[in-house]
Amino acid sequence: MNPFEQLGVSSEIQAAIARLGFEQPTPIQEQAIPVLLETGRDLTALAQTGTGKTAAFGIPLIQLLDASINQLQALVICPTRELCLQISRDLESYAVNIPGVEIAAVYGGSSIDKQIKAIRGGAQIVVATPGRLMDLMSRKAVHLEKVRFVVLDEADEMLNMGFEEDVEHILSFTPAVKRVCLFSATMPPEIRRIAKKYMTDPVEVAVGKANSGNANIEHEYAVVQARDKYPTLKRVLDYTGDSFYGIVFLTTKMETQDISDKLIRDGYSADCLHGDLSQQQRDKVMNRFRHKAVRILLATDVAARGIDVSGLTHVIHYNLPDAIENYTHRSGRTARAGKSGISFTLLNVRESYKLKEIEKKSGITFKRIQIPSAREVLDRKLLNFTQHIASQLVDESLFDAENFQNMEVLMAMEKQDLVKKILSLELNRFAADYLDAPDLNVSGKTAESMDQSEGGGSRVFVSVGKKDGFDTLGFKDWVADLCGLKKKQLHVYVKGVYSFVDVTPTLVPAVLEGLNGAQFNERSVRAELTASKAGGFQPEGSWKKKDDGNRGGGGGYGKKSYGDNKGRQGGGYKGKSDRKSYGSGESRGFKKRAY
């Protein structure tokens, strides 16, 4: 018996997915499809991107639709345009043998009139990004009163992108009686709250655990100095050669564009994605990347959300993300559909605590490797080139008698001399970069020991955190303003009721002076230099007990405003002397990104 038949999948859909190469259901499909087809209950599913989750909800949706009724019956909400298009294409392929099924993709950056026409033309399924769907709702172009199924795909990504309030607004227009399916790679408290509010006794299924990575991914890192990151990246790309097809993640738009420009200038097949690109530019980059005209894509976390490209061999973390779940999302871009992949981190000595947090909370084990030497890279280049020549098929039709006459000078040479000359032409392209090139590894020392020596960095404990309404960007802004420092001089890590600030030792006095005694929610902030930056610090005294009793309502700095687009607002902090006040609705310049 066909394994999908055992899950209850109809013969029409079985035939459709067989043409797509579906032979065995993935673990998430095995668990989710019978729940959706047979139980009638809501579903909460923990699954990484690339585990086959689109088919896990898409196959049941197609099968449960009434194709004879030309009205909206199912709504799929997802965070980005790319994911919206991918899901709609997948659903269309599952429904190819079922006449009358119409699917509309609704997203920003494309003609809204065409999308309205598709909906009014009788689409039974709408796949939508939150912003465009709300626009259509405000125009009365889409009506959700008779929706029977709602799927929230990559729910954690939607929350990370600031769509929580939008999603709740959309759900408030759907009928009370409906089935809700929620798919997420991680399960933060906000996801649990939405599930509790909008779902009824859901069945919970999981592939892996929260924040865990794909088992087929090798997690590697090398310890390098910050100044050596770009030459290290080049050396890794050169050593890997033409087999590299992947994404390099960076933290800022400016750095993403800068590193991309450098790679292109140095002859690499690279391009970049970041928030300053127009939709047309973004589409052009992604089209070239999908077709491997570009093999190295540099991207920020926000710009890369929703990208689903098969066959990626590598993910490189030029900088580690501040949020652990972002590491999981990044690394999950590779090793899809049962394939293997490598997630490699260029670890600056001041980021070792992030690596430890990821290991602790995700169960991932990182393997430290050495950056190849210049000689090793050249040897690998030589090997790849010789293998390429040896495997080259000869097309005799390209040669004539004149060609052979012109090659007499080559034929007269000694075989060894001829081979050396040919190989020299190839190696000369790289010799300039690798002649007398230094060892880029932080030799003989672990990242932890580097933190404590050679000025690797110092860590300051601060007695405010997420419970006070801070997020990473908001906290970094707050510290920078108070201490008179630039944000790029700070590395911050925001936890529940406290935070850490990592700076060079020379900046520690400025941080301590700026933060100690500052007032936040009518209580004094406390900052202390920790005993160790490698982790495990516990400040002296019962600070948790003292702070928990007088937090003053949580403040609100760092929280997002949606209705008036004012961005992150102040809520409780009043600076010392004449410093800025974070409150009174003052705009901080952060706006929710439109997708």
Image (spheres, helix red, strand yellow):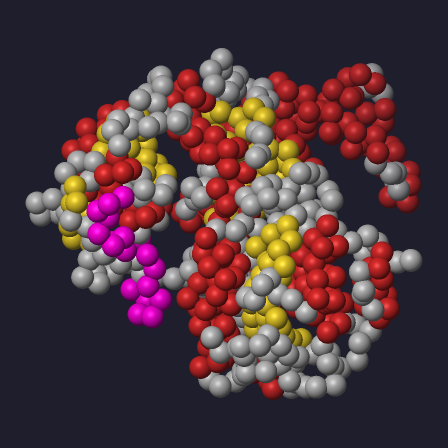
Residue 39 sits above or below residue 522 on the image: below
Residue 550 on the magenta span? yes
Give how far across and how far down residue 568 sits, in percent: 30, 57
Q: Main secondary structure of the magenta part?
A: loop
Displayed quadrant of residue 487? top left
Q: Position of residue 186 (x, y in %)?
A: 54, 50
Task: Classify residue 358 as left or right of residue 35.
Answer: left
Q: Which residues are magenta?
A: 548-566
> Where is 66 relative to 273, above or below?
below
Q: Position of residue 538 (x, y in %)?
A: 33, 28
274 versus 542 height, above or below: below
Q: Is residue 453 above or below residue 547?
A: above
Q: Residue at x 55, y 66 (%)?
A: 199
Is residue 21 visible to us here? Answer: no
> Residue 540 colored magenta?
no
Q: How many discs appear?
A: 0
The answer to whether residue 403 is left or right of residue 274 is: right
